[in-house]
Amino acid sequence: MSQIILSGRGVSKSFRGLKAIQDVDFDIPEGSIFGLIGPNGAGKSTLFNLITGYYPLTAGEIRFKDQDLSPLPTYRRNQAGIARAFQISKPFPALTVRENIRVGAMFGDASRAASEDTVEQALATVGLQDLADRTAEGLTVGALRKLEVARAFATRPTLLLADEPCAGLNPVETREMVECLRKVREHGVTVWLVEHDMKAVTSICDRIIVIDAGKKIAEGSPQEIVADPKVIAAYLGEPLEEAGH
Ligand code: ADP
Ligand code: MG
């Protein structure tokens, strides 16, 4: 049995009257790749924002490595080991790929030598070695997305939250991103990702949580999720074979 690295109990968030997240429970085992799916506006990004501390909870509790996260501001949560890969990567355009990753590594605060090891490991993990000396401006969307994962990885997290890392990528880039997240996990990092591409999500995830209108409606293995009538009704619309994305 692996340890639970992140858990939520009764996690809730309201924006004025709108209940964006309602009473959601989760347990993320260390070393797993977890998925989070649901229709647009279901509350997926909000849930990640609650975990990183971008928003305070309205009710409930989130624990990371058995520590209540509520007193910790975002940067302290990052120092504790929670990293987030943003969908819109905003690298320093004039810096090279390697230099951009180094910024993440320095943020992860260690000696210069340890940082350099981390930078090279991050480059290899996402497969950007060949572009390491190119400036970030002019990178393709696929390469920018990998750079964003590498930057987050270089902060030496134990948990990586990735919000739609494959959005806008072509099928080849999507496969590469899936591979890249697998490699991140091979380095011992637990991954929780939001993803619309069902092929990507079912191929990579050990387990998936489904939310709809702020509520958790299902949790299970990819096979259980795609066969779950509630999930089909709320999200998939049709069995996976015909769900053309
Ligand atoms: P998803 O990522 O699943 O598409 P979001 O978490 O972005 O959904 O949004 C969930 C709901 O919360 C939506 O109705 C959205 O409009 C609302 N929401 C998100 N952030 C805010 C905010 N800062 N203020 C008010 N409403 C918000
Ligand atoms: Mg979102």
Image (cartoon, grey):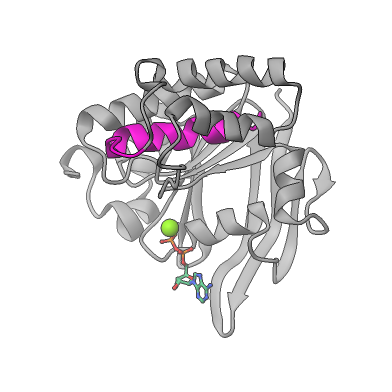
Asked if one can make out residue 108 in the rendered structure from this viewpoint, the answer is yes
Determine which quarter of the picture holds residue 227.
top left
Left/right of residue 182 with respect to residue 72 in the rendered view? left
Q: Residue furthest front?
A: 94
Q: Position of residue 98 (x, y in %)?
A: 48, 25
Left/right of residue 38 with respect to residue 63 in the rendered view? left
Left/right of residue 237 with respect to residue 244 in the rendered view? right
Residue under the image location 50 percent in, 57 percent down: 45
Residue under the image location 56 percent in, 85 percent down: 17
Q: Quadrant of the N terminus?
A: top right
Residue 146 drawn above or below residue 66 = above
Magenta region includes residue 156: yes
Determine which quarter of the picture holds residue 178.
top left
Residue under the image location 41 percent in, 21 percent down: 132
Q: Position of residue 65 (x, y in %)?
A: 78, 38
User: What range of the chain is rendered magenta?
Assistant: 137-157
User: Which is nearer the eye, 43 or 70?
Assistant: 70
User: Which is nearer the eye, 73 or 147?
Assistant: 147
Magenta region includes residue 143: yes
